Image: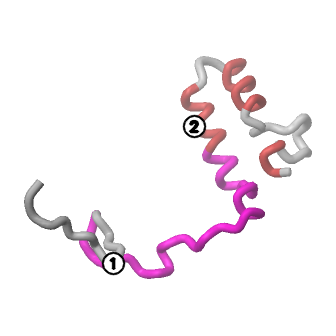
Amino acid sequence: MSGSARVPTQVTNQRYGGEVPASAIPSQRSAADAYRVTEDQVHRARIVVARNAEDSEDCRQLLDMLGLIGTSADSLPPVRR
């Protein structure tokens, strides 16, 4: 392989070609944060499961298996505990 490879020194926005502001880069997560799941993440996961399930029973089983539904309507799903 000839030539030298150039390593970028700044983060750039590939879509628009400009620099990405520092506020757009997520901060490092701690060990405690690694296990936190937001309500928005749960909602988006439920949508993905619902779109890809074969039928309502398949959807319920997948949601239960992934811990995305609670045992009752008032309880938190296991991923949020």
The percent coordinates of residue 15 (x first, y second) are: 28, 64
The percent coordinates of residue 44 (x first, y second) are: 61, 46
Residue carrying label 2: 48
Q: How is the image coloured?
A: secondary structure
- The magenta stretch spans which residues? 15-44
Please report contact status of discs 2 and 1: CB closer than 8 Å, yes or no.
no
Residue 30 placement, left or right of 4: right
Residue, x 88% and y 40% (percent of image)? 73
Q: Which quadrant is home to the N terminus?
A: bottom left
Residue carrying label 1: 10
Check if residue 30 falls in the magenta segment: yes
66 or 30: nearer the viewer: 30
73 or 65: nearer the viewer: 65
Q: Earlier in the sequence, mark 2 or mark 1?
A: 1
The local secondary structure at tag 1 comes to loop
The percent coordinates of residue 45 (x first, y second) are: 63, 42
Residue 56 placement, left or right of 16: right
The local secondary structure at tag 2 comes to helix
Residue, x 73% and y 63% (percent of image)? 31
Q: Residues within 10 Å of mark 2 (few under 14, many from 20)?
A: few
29 or 18: nearer the viewer: 29
Under mark 2, the amino acid is Val
Under mark 1, the amino acid is Gln
Residue, x 74% and y 26% (percent of image)? 60
